[in-house]
Image (cartoon, rainbow, N blue to C red):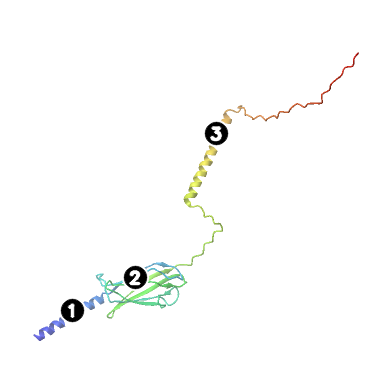
Amino acid sequence: MLLVQIRRLVLAAGAILFTHLASAASLRLQAVEGNGMVVSPNAVSSRKITVSAEDENGKPLGGVTVRFRLPVQGSSGHFGSGLAFETVVTPANGRATVLGVLWNNQPGRVLLAVSASIDGESAELEIPVEIGAHKEREPALTSPLRPPSSGSMKKWLLLAATVAGATALGVAASALRGATNPAAPVAQTPLPIAAVPPALGTPVIGIATPGH
């Protein structure tokens, strides 16, 4: 009886060990977030970098130690700890995440090296990240007035074109009327004539002499 129980225990331990080794041998790393993202230079990124530790059937593996490593020179940065590497142990969902990377001021491509290990088995992955170029400052506006929006500009241009078209049509119509009736009199407005009051001179009274 005792031998039977021992045999069962040995078989059970062997089965557990075989299953664990099979899972470790099929360890895979998959990039979930951050692959190919573009970040700003000399700034802390709020975007996540996430990988998933899975077996060959896509089942998440917990308890996997995942290490993230940034280059030691060139386009690179460091994690919130101030170091160029970070270690995360995956929970039951098999995902490991880092964020808050402070990227340096050297634009270019960064290859973030990711490695995972469990019970002597390992897997590796590289996640490319692009540090963008420096952005030039836009010149400040000297006028406090805001430039018109594209919609307002289109309305003004349409109104100006309508007025110009109407004016041109009126000029053409006037020219056509003048060409068909060249002898048409042109009405002129008479100039107003101011009334001048008569000038009164000094009255002359004659006195007749008797006998003349």
Assign a secondary structure to mark 2. Answer: strand
Sequence-first tag of 2 and 3:
2
CA gap, disc 2 and disc 3: 74 Å
Considering the numbered disc 3 on the image, is that residue within a helix, a strand or a loop?
helix
Residue 58 sits in quarter: bottom left
Residue 109, given in percent of the width and then of the height, sits at 42, 70
Residue extending farthest left: 1
Image point 23% across, 76% down: which residue?
22
Q: Are marks 1 and 2 in contact (CB under 8 Å)?
A: no
Q: Residue at x 13, y 83 (%)?
A: 7
Tag 1 residue: 15
Q: Are marks 3 and 1 in contact (CB under 8 Å)?
A: no
User: Mark 1 belongs to which amino acid?
Assistant: Ala
**Image quarter hosting the N terminus:** bottom left
**22, 59: nearer the viewer:** 59
Q: Is residue 168 left or right of residue 132?
A: right
Residue identifier under label 3 = 173
Query: Label 2 neighbourhood size at 10 Å, few (<14), some (14-19), many (20+)?
Result: some
Q: Nearer the viewer, residue 190 or 78?
A: 190
What mark, if any, has residue 50 been given in the picture?
2
Kind of element beneath mark 1? helix
Q: State left or right for residue 189 relative to residue 167.
A: right
- Toward the right, the furthest residue is 211
Image position of 59 with respect to 141: above or below = below
